């Protein structure tokens, strides 16, 4: 608990809580960028699952720059939001569930991008069952990340470690 | 909606609908703006029904939000701007399918899109990003009960 109190007293944490626009901007950037991250995954995974079959699968990677930029924005804004109320997230198991779901989903993306999506042979052909299952799992993991992210606002045990409500 | 889980569950589904819209309509807009050249636009457009489904779901959930707590929405400038942006996006959709979609559909995979398509795509993308921003703002700023532009 002590380290949470210490984190809450760092200048960055205080600034995030007390300057109105800082917290608000971080929230807005976090939700918009997360929308694009999940969005790129929706498009890619739907394509792997067999929808829009005339889209050359390997070319879906050309949307990935959107993913990388959004991942940077999401991480930076996420760290700032965490800095504002560290105890709120770090004492909630759902926060770690959310991070785990995101890391697992990104591992799936990496494996699909380096395998299936690298092979022009699958541009027009049906993806193998294993790849389709991974694509479906990825969509489920993103849904889980979104769900746990939203529930963080409802399920926290405490807002701050230094003065508990 | 007034149960302990109703509101958070609706919010979560609202975000899923948003992701469907960004993932299909948003990616189609980005393609028209010149990203991911090589993907035939007519082929990518086959994903758009998913975005329409997400949009329809979000309209239903949105009506549930507003009817459950009208005082949080009707006088909230974020909600008013959000509705205005949805209106602009709607007019843009009509304009796009009436005048621009034909040539876009026939364009080659590597082709540059007509200027009108780029304008429509830019309007669509900015409106939907604006809608997300305003949506996030609705619960962040809870205005006093009788707030409106004209009083």
Image (tube, coloured by chain):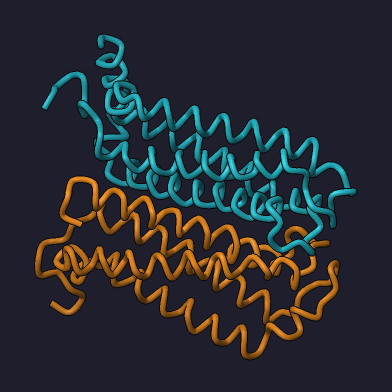
Chain colours: A cyan, B orange
Quadrant that contains the C terminus of chain A:
top left
Locate residue B125 relative to residue A125 in the image: left or right. left
Query: Is residue B8 among the parts visible in the rendering?
Result: yes
Task: Give percent across and percent down for residue B20.
Answer: 52, 59
- Residue in front for this viewpoint, A100 or A129: A129
Q: How many marks?
A: 0
Q: Quadrant of the N terminus of chain A?
A: top left
Residue in the image at 84% along x and 42% along y: A118
Q: Is residue A67 left or right of residue B149?
A: right
The residue at the point 37 percent across, 34 percent down is A81
Query: Residue B56 versus residue A13: which sits nearer the camera?
Result: B56
Toward the front, the furthest residue is A129
Can residue A12 be seen? no
Q: Residue at x 39, y 43 (%)?
A: A147
Foreground pick, A74 / A106: A106
Q: Which residue does the image show at 56% across and 45% down from the upper left? A: A139
Depicted A64 relative to depicted B18: above or below? above
Residue B69 is situated, as x and y percent measured from the top left of the image, at 16, 63
Q: What is the x, y in percent for residue A112? A: 73, 38
Left or right placement of residue B4 versus residue B45 in this view: left
Counting from the top left corner in percent of width and height, residue A32 is at: 47, 52
Q: Which residue is outermost to the top?
A: A2
């Amino acid at each position: 608990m002590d380290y949470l109190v210490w984190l809450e007293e760092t200048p960055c944490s205080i600034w995030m809580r007390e300057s109105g626009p800082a917290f608000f901007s971080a929230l807005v950037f976090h939700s918009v960028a997360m929308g694009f991250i999940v969005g790129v995954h929706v498009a890619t995974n739907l394509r792997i699952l067999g929808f829009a079959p005339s889209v050359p699968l390997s070319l879906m990677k050309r949307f990935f720059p959107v993913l990388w930029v959004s991942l940077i924005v999401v991480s930076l804004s996420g760290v700032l939001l965490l800095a504002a109320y560290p105890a709120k997230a770090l004492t909630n198991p759902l926060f770690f569930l959310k991070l785990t779901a995101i890391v697992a989903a990104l591992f799936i993306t990496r494996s699909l991008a380096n395998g299936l999506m690298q092979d022009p042979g699958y541009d027009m052909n049906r993806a193998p069952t294993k790849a389709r299952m991974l694509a479906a799992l990825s969509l489920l993991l993103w849904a889980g990340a979104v769900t746990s992210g939203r529930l963080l606002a409802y399920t926290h045990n405490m807002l701050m470690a230094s003065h508990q409500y | 909606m007034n149960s302990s889980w109703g509101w958070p569950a609706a919010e979560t589904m609202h975000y899923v609908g948003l992701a469907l819209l960004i993932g299909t309509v948003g990616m189609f807009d980005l393609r028209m703006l010149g990203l991911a050249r090589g993907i035939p636009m007519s082929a990518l457009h086959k994903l758009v029904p998913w975005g329409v489904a997400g949009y329809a779901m979000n309209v239903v959930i949105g009506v549930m939000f507003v009817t459950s707590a009208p005082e949080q929405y009707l006088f909230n400038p974020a909600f008013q701007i959000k509705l205005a942006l949805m209106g602009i996006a709607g007019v843009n959709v009509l304009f796009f399918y009436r005048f621009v979609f034909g040539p876009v559909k026939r364009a080659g995979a590597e082709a540059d899109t007509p200027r009108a398509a780029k304008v429509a795509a830019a309007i669509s993308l900015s409106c939907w990003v604006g809608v997300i921003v305003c949506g996030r703002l609705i619960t962040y700023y809870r205005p006093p009960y009788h707030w409106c532009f004209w009083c």
